[in-house]
Amino acid sequence: MKYLDEYRDPRAARKLVAEIERIQTRPWTLMEICGGQTHTIVKFGIDRLLPEAIELVHGPGCPVCVTPLEMIDRAHAIAVRPEVTFTSFGDMLRVPGTGSDLLALKAEGCDVRVVYSPLDAVELAARLPDREVVFFAIGFETTSPANAMAVKQAERRGLSNFSVLVSHVLVPPALRAILESPDNRVQGFLGPGHVCTVVGTEEYEPIAERYHVPIEVTGFEPVDMLEGILALVEQLETGRAEVRTPYRRVVRREGNKQALALVREVFEVCDRKWRGVGNIPESGYRLREKYSSFDAEKRFDVAAIEARESPVCISGQILRGVKKPVDCPAFGEACTPQNPLGATMVSAEGACAAYYAYGRHLAGVTG
Amino acid sequence: MCLGIPGKVVDTFEEHGILMGKVSFDGVVKKICLDHVRDAHAGDYVLVHVGFALSKIDEDEAKETFDLLEKMGGLEEIREPKT
């Protein structure tokens, strides 16, 4: 248990691992959904502390990763226009499109800027009235209140030179898609704690019931995650399939109602394509008709741009928990964080990037 | 990407019709939208994602989460200089 020294509370972690070993009688495959949790698991070697029969597979919980390649190419087509100031979060701007990544366009004289908050992009639009300021609005539920507020504020402030390129995705439809796929192996989920601070846990209840899978909403601290894993194994061993929140310190069942009301005012649910996975019905957001004047895809007429993915990449199977990064022949060879071939390598929170960062592509390395 | 970073509210003010505030992340003070957590006051701890407070949290949890983020290299977004 070499990793345990780095835990906030090694004694608690050791106890939790021992308890998981004690109660587990059958093999179980569990999936964590949040990219931050994937990162914790690999960094702290949680998967290697557990009994071999408990397998952790890594879900589609990194919004940067699942943003389709053609959306990045559309962003590119907008960002190269001379009148455009193109903005987004730093990790999104670093993802390569079919050509270069968006930040690389800066070297060619394009105005591409990292913003911390979507409201910073709105502020830029106010400060630069002669520029078209575009914000690449990506994210899961967690980010949707911020992106919705940016649109709302641009409207309130009469900023007609602001628009958003929306590529928003939702967690519950992705879980349904994973569970309905014929090769599904996932028997229980670690739910994403910070996503649930916004949406609550209500939406997960019908999933647990219909597919008979337990869901434990948890944080991303290693001891929190071990508690979540123990609780999942307990549920599985006793045949239960409930949604529970050991992470209730932050998460309310109904989420943040005020934030959700704004999200629903600005966005409506639509089908979305997930990079690596493909189209998932009703799995994302687009702007409501009322806000369509802020839609960058329409304003710059880029919706027809399509892109082709690497045929070698198995990120779709990795995102559904069917395969692991090390199962891919390209992993760490043709595909690295510097030259990513697909979804799970493009951002630090992707499963392949996390495995790579902690040396799991190196033969003989067990740490 | 979806992680929230805990910070302490220093003060609050209205700007362009919404509630904003100065929030300190271990000394790094940033302007944060508090409009989704309108009962946040100076001295409260909030969980902040991309410049928006999403919920209030207690001080112990704020400290625990902050320490972990530091260990994980998850504080870049509040330290990254704007370009």
Image (spheres, grey):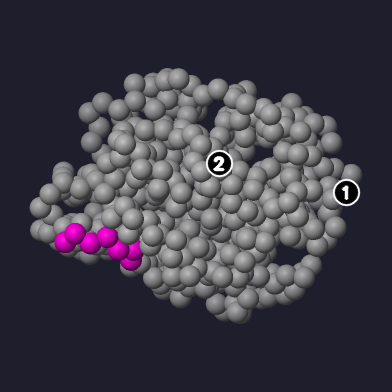
Q: Quadrant of residue A357?
A: top left
Image location (x, y in percent) of residue A38? 37, 46
Image location (x, y in percent) of residue A4? 24, 54
N-terminal of the two: label 1 or label 2? Answer: 1
Which amino acid is tagged 1?
Pro
Whether B77 is drawn above or below B13: the answer is above
Whether A98 is drawn above or below B67: the answer is above
* Magenta-drawn stretch contains A243: yes
For the point 48% across and 58% down, the residue is A195
Q: Chain of mark 1?
A: A
- Name the residue carrying label 1: A129
- Asked whether residue A5 appears in the rendered view, the answer is no
Image location (x, y in percent) of residue A359? 33, 34
For the point 51% across and 24% down, the residue is A309
Callout 2: SS? strand
Q: Quadrant of the C terminus of chain A?
A: top left
Q: Which residues are magenta?
A: A238-244
For the point 74% across and 26% down, the residue is A108
- Name the residue carrying label 2: A272
Q: Main secondary structure of the magenta part?
A: loop
Whether residue A324 sits left or right of residue B50 in the image: it is left
Q: Quadrant of residue A248?
A: bottom left
Numbered mark located on residue A166 in the image: none
Q: Residue furthest right?
A: A130
Which amino acid is tagged 2?
Arg
Q: Quadrant of residue A70?
A: top right
